[in-house]
Each structure stands twice: as structure tokens, then as C-alpha cells.
Image (spheres, rainbow, N blue to C red):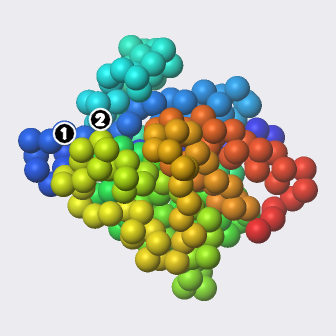
Amino acid sequence: MNQRILHVVTNVSHYDDPSHPTGLWLSELVHAWEVFEEHGFAQSIVSPHGGAVPLEPRSLKFPSYDKAARAWHTDPARMALLETTARPEEIDPADFDAVYFTGGHAVMYDFPDSEGLQRITREIWERGGVVSSVCHGYCGLLNTRLSDGSLLVAGRKVTGFAWQEEVLARVDKLVPYNAEEEMRSRGALYEKARLPFVSYAVADGRLVTGQNPGSAKETARKVAEVLQARSNRGPRQ
């Protein structure tokens, strides 16, 4: 049976200051989608509130707006998938083998405290599935607790958009918190590449995370590897 991937995207369209738009970083969805598609995986999309997904304007510019992102953005059928995303309560975690949290600064607002997303993540993890994120998507893992009350990320290797990258991207004054610092405060073993903005992904068992937009493909490939190993050997911690 084909592996099944649940992509998580945002519903938020701006920072605290409405004059600064944000949203889904399109390539983080598209690049992973292509990798999973190449493996024949079935894919679905959920957002914290369901419905339409705004796009981060900067993700529609060079170099992020590459051939793959442009092809998705100009394809009405693909774009329709981002107008009709499912709500968490419509999702049965038992239907999925992995969850993949996409990024964009918008997710810093609606991912961390979504009880629906936390439920999905917890149940997929505890059924032996893969939990993954890329870039700011790791904000969706900050507050997820397992059935025993422990934080999913505590004591596990994690990466995600680094504070240095926030500064270099000139949004350190706009973001609502320091995600790297918050992840460390949860007891996560945060890692990052020696250089900013290069592809970097970490797999700690069934927890797979990527650092920045350029890491989406590498992250998805690692997810696929873990899923295939899981399929061959059965669920593992």
C-alpha cells in the first residue's frame, strides 16, 4: 500500500503588523510534494482552520520562485488544493504515515497552539509514523505533547530556521518570538548548518526536520527513507 503524507500549511496572511504580509513559503510545499510524488505516495493538505492558504510574497520571487514553484503557482488545479484545505477535525491520523509541517513566518502564529494539529501529530507519532517539518514548520512541534505528557521534541535532534537567518533576512524585528530559542527551551537538541541558508536536514529516528526553504527536498527524501525502512522493518521508535 502507498505511504500517505499529510502536509500542514498556514492560514495566516500577515505579521502582527498587517502592513507586512506573509503566508506559506510555496517552494517548501512544492519541493517536498514532488519528492513524495516521485515515490508514489498519496498526499493531502490540512491547515489549522481549513480553507484558503495565503502565499508568502517573497516566496514568489527569485531564487525561491523556481521552475517547480512557478509550475504549481500557474496550475489552477494545484492552486485549488490551497483553496480547499481540510480542517484538523476532518483528519483521521490513522489514515496517514507521516505529517510534514511546511513553513513561512505565518506558521509562527497559528501552528504552535493548534490543538487539532497537536492531536494529529501525537497520534501519527504514537502509531509509529513519521513527524517532519521544514524551516518555520518546526514551530508546529513546539508544544506537542505525547500521551505521557512529555514534549515530543524533548531530548531529540531538531533543526529549523535559525535566528541568524532571521537576522540576515531582516525580519528579526517582525517575528513574534525566537523559534530557535523556544525550541531549545523545550529540551530539543537543536542543530544547524555551519553556513546560513544552505540545505540541512536531521533525522532522529522518526523525527525529521529541515532548516530552511532550501532544505525541503532533502527533508522529504529523508522522510521517504524513514518510511521505506519502517515499511520493511515495521514501526520503530
Above/below status of 68 relative to 106:
above
At which x and y percent is residue 7?
Answer: 52, 44
- The image position of residue 78, as x and y in percent, is 45, 23
Q: In this view, does 144 lie above or below 56?
A: below
Query: Is 45 on the left or on the right of 128, as rendered?
Result: left
Q: Quadrant of the C terminus?
A: bottom right
Query: Which x, y percent locates residue 211?
Result: 51, 49
Q: Which amino acid does label 2 sit on?
A: Glu
| Residue located farthest toward the right when viewing the structure as drawn | 233
Q: In this view, does 21 lie above or below 92?
A: above
Q: Name the residue under label 1.
A: 21
Foreground residue, 92 or 130? 130
Query: Which quadrant would residue 79 be assigned to in this image?
Result: top left
Residue drawn at (32%, 56%) of the image? 108
* Residue assigned mark 2: 56
Say whether disc 2 or disc 1 marks the residue closer to the N-terminus: 1
Which residue is painted at 73% across and 62% down in the image? 205
Q: Nearer the viewer, residue 212 or 6?
A: 212
Residue in the picture at 41% in, 46% down: 103
Looking at the rendered structure, the number of numbered marks drawn on it comes to 2
**Is any atom of residue 110 visible in this view?**
no
